[in-house]
Amino acid sequence: MDESNQKKHDIDSQNSIPTDTHRSSITKAFRYAIEGLIYTVKTQRNMKVHLVVAVLAIIASVLLKLTSIEWAIILVLIGLVLMTEMLNTAIEAIIDLSSPEYHKLAKIAKDVGAGMVLVFAILAVIAGLIVYVSAYLRLVG
């Protein structure tokens, strides 16, 4: 086997993961993801606030008898708010690791990450209100 064919064979062999190893890998990936979620909920006050608001949004969605499309919009908004909070938490952890002492650029990065969450949360509230007001008006007449 010439060198280029050997490299191709090596790459193909690496992509052929036995099923039991693949399952184990997927299980580990889910475990790590859940650990990240738990870490964020335990350590980030704003994540707790977002989760309380998400539960209230779901209750309001049930009470207002949202349509399928409205439910999809609300669930996507909830997911994106939670994701931005988790992304901000990851950004902060990376900055803390790379810059343990105070640095102006580290502060800027953290502030921008927090601003990202704030902007999206405000827009999500506005979009949610549009959905809820429309649903309420439909219910009352």
Image (cartoon, grey):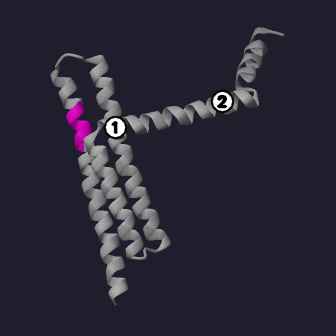
Instruction: Rate crowding at label 1 as few (under 14), some (14 to 19) or many (20 or more) other CA atoms within 10 Å.
Output: few
Q: CA distance from mark 2 to mark 1?
A: 26 Å
**Height in image: 101 above or below 78?**
above
**Residue drawn where x is 29% and y is 30% of the image:** 92
The residue at the far bottom in this view is: 141
The residue sitting at 27% across, 22% down in the picture is 96
Residue range in magenta is 110-115
Expressed as whole percent of the image width and height from the top left, the position of residue 28 reads 58, 30
In the image: residue 37, left or right of residue 107: right
Quadrant of residue 37 within the rendered picture: top left
- Crowd class of label 2 (few under 14; some 14 to 19; many from 20; radius 10 Å): few
Q: Is 116 colored magenta in this rendering? A: no
Prevailing SS of the magenta stretch: helix
Disc sitting over residue 107 in the figure:
none
Find disc 1 in the rendering and name its residue.
42
The amino acid type, in three-letter code, at marker 1 is: Lys
Q: Is residue 65 above or below residue 45?
A: below
Tell me the element at label 2. helix
**Quadrant holding the C terminus:** bottom left
Task: Looking at the image, tell me whether mark 2 or mark 1 is earlier in sequence order.
Answer: 2
Q: Residue at x 34, y 37 (%)?
A: 42
Mark nearer the viewer, 2 or 1:
1
Report which residue position mark 2 lands on: 24
Q: Is residue 111 magenta?
A: yes
**Which is more toward the observer, 2 or 131?**
131
* Amino acid residing under circle 2: Ser
Quadrant where the image shows the N terminus: top right
